[in-house]
Structures are given as structure tokens and as C-alpha cells.
Amino acid sequence: MNGLIRAELLKARASRATWILAALAPPLCVAWAGLMVFLMGLEGGMPLDAQIENVYSMAQQAYVVTLLLGVLGMAGENRHQTITWQFLVTPGRSRVVTAKLAAYGIVGLLVATVSALVTLVAGLVTLTLAGHPAWSPGVPAVLLGSALGVALYGLLGVALGALIRNQVAAVAVALVWFMYADYLLVSFLPDLGRWLPTGAARALSGMPLRTGELLPAWAGGMLFAGYVAVIVLAARALTLRRDIT
């Protein structure tokens, strides 16, 4: 199994898309953090500590990168028909899926860690320059929750790539649902949205809402991990049963 994971990591490292997407994650988080600093004081009367934590919670915006990396890493095998050779070389399909999940979990954690550290620095600098307090007691938990959520999105991407084997369709579903549909439900229908995957992930990252409330961070983390686990198990079961030709 260790050899399979190393092989998957080698394939990820050899892909140009991996490096391009990974390089986009930190500046994306910095841009969002800067926007939150610019909007401070306009967030519907939110407490100051919540607004400060909202800046650092932008580390979770790297989720779109790890989600896409997972989708491309799995669905790309079907697009290029390399999945057939993969299963022939390693007859145990479950081992291949497990190796994919482990590899992109590691990649996702690396991207999440770098993004969280860069967001920490960006938050300290921009808040200070803007004349706002640069720290609150909840910031460490926010950064940790954001990093965990971003890493879990990598596993979710692999599972989606296994469920939806067409790469274009898998990317479209991932982006449309997790960047727009689910996100809008969280923002405009918080009583419903807090129970959806995006709402649970946002709760884990400590991101507050201007209207309504998300779940506590621990509950959001458990719920989001549960969503990921269910989708992963469904993808694994389907991969073990269906024809790959």
C-alpha cells in the first residue's frame, strides 16, 4: 500500500495542473483576506472578534483548489484511460481507491497548511496596516479548522471523480454545487444551509454569517467529515462493481 501511495504522489507531482492549482491557493486566500479587511465595519454589526476571525477564516478559500485536485486526480485517470492499466497492475481496486484518497489527502493537507500560514501572515499585516486589532483568541482554532476543511475537500474531490467518471462533468458539478448552489443556500437560507456540506465546512473554519448562525465548529467538522465519508464509501462501492471499459 505504501508503494501505491508513493506512486500516486509521484503522479500528482509530475502533473503540471497540480503545481498550477497549488500555486493559486495562497494568493486566492490572501485576496479574500484583504477583501474581508476592507469590509470590516460593514458586516451587519458583527462583533469585532468575529470580524477579525472572519479575515483568517479565508484560509478555507483554498478548498476549491484541493477539490479540483482530487477530481482531476481521479477523473483524469478515466479521461486518459490509464485507470484500466492501474487496475490491471493492481487487481485490488479498493487498494487503488484507498491510495488515491491517501495521496490527495496528503496533497490537500500540504496545500491547506501553506494556505493557512500565508493567510495568517496576510491577516496580521493587512489588519495592522488598516488600523484594526490583528488578533483575537479564536484565530488559532479558525486557522486549524480551515486547514482541516480544505484537506477534507481533497478527499471529497477524489470521491466525486470516482462517482462521475467524465472529467468535465465532474469538474462542472464540483464547481457549480460547492462554489455556487450550496454556497448560496448557506448565505440566503442559513436554517437549511447550515446542514449542507458547505455550511458544515464553513462552520468548521469558524466563518460567521451576517444572518443566521452556523453550527458550532466541532459539530460542523463532524457533519462535514460525515458527508465526506458517505460520499467516499459510495464512490468506493461503485468503483468496485462497475465496468471500467
Image (spheres, rainbow, N blue to C red):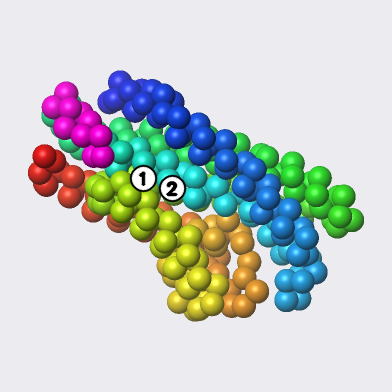
Residue bearing mark 2:
67
Dominant SS of magenta comes to helix
The circle on residue 71 is 1
Q: Is residue 67 left or right of residue 55?
A: left
Q: Is residue 241 left or right of residue 233?
A: left
Specify whether residue 52 is in view.
no
* The C terminus, quarter of image: top left
- Residue 150 pos. (x, y %): 51, 47
- Residue 186 pos. (x, y %): 51, 71
> 10 Å neighbourhood of mark 2: few (<14), some, or many (≥20)?
many
- Quick check: 88 above or below 215? above
Q: Secondary structure at mark 2?
A: helix
Q: Is residue 185 left or right of residue 5?
A: right
Q: Residue at x 73, y 76 (%)?
A: 44
- Quick check: 90 above or below 219? above
The boundaries of the magenta stretch are 78-89
Q: Is residue 227 left or right of residue 43?
A: left
Q: Alpha-carbon distance for marks 1 and 2?
A: 6 Å
- Tell me the kind of residue under disc 2: Leu
Q: Nearer the viewer, residue 159 or 173?
A: 173
Q: Is residue 85 magenta?
A: yes
Q: Residue at x 51, y 35 (%)?
A: 20
- Residue 50 pos. (x, y %): 71, 64
- Residue 222 pos. (x, y %): 44, 58
Q: Which quarter of the picture shows residue 43?
A: bottom right
Specify whether residue 227 is in view.
yes
